Amino acid sequence: MKILIDMNLSPDWVEELAKHGIESVHWSLIGDFDAPDKVLIDYAKENDYVVFTHDLDFGTALALTRAEKPSVIQVRTQDVTVSHLKNMVINTLMEHTVLLEKGALIVIDEQKKRVRILPL
């Protein structure tokens, strides 16, 4: 599984994910900082990445297009720092690897996570 980290999350996630054997890249290294979500979604789909974002529009885009890929992990918290979210995110990635490889939207917040199989 490869993770594409959206611009609205820290590039520090690359190092944190690597500690757990998870390959990732921050969008700032491969795309324009102001690229529309569709560009990022298309890149992730074409290159077999799971999108990791704080942007709520990705779930809507998946639903409207009935897309089966890419999978998206969406965090819905005010504090999106690596130190605050790392345990939740890493545990979710490890627990739901198979679903993320097949196509899923996972929404994580402070109290719970919701898993939806694609297409929505």
Image (cartoon, rainbow, N blue to C red):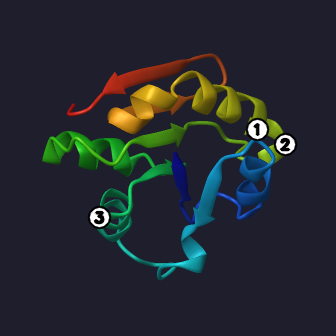
Q: CA distance from mark 1 to mark 2?
A: 6 Å
Please give the residue where the numbered disc 3 appears in the rendered image: 42
Callout 3 amino acid: Asp
Q: Is residue 74 left or right of residue 44?
A: right
Residue located 20% across and 34% down the image: 119
- Label 2 sits on a secondary structure element that is helix
Q: Earlier in the sequence, mark 2 or mark 3?
A: 3
Q: Secondary structure at mark 3?
A: helix
Task: Identify the secondary structure beneath mark 1.
Answer: helix
Mark 3–mark 1 Cα distance, whole angstroms, equals: 26 Å
> Does residue 110 sit above or below 54 in this rendering?
above
Q: How many marks?
A: 3
Residue at x 36% of width, y 50% of height: 57
Labels 2, 3: front one: 3
Residue 46: mark:
none
Q: Position of residue 88 (x, y in %)?
A: 70, 28
**Residue 107 appearing in the image:** yes
Q: In front here: 83 or 3?
A: 3
As drawn, 102 above or below 11: above
Q: CA distance from mark 2 to mark 3?
A: 29 Å
Q: Position of residue 111 (x, y in %)?
A: 64, 17
Residue at the far right: name it: 83
**Residue 97 percent location from the top left of the image:** 51, 30
x then y, percent, for residue 56: 42, 46
Per the image, the residue denoted by label 2 is 83
Q: Are marks 1 and 2 in contact (CB under 8 Å)?
A: yes
Q: What residue is disc 1 on? A: 86
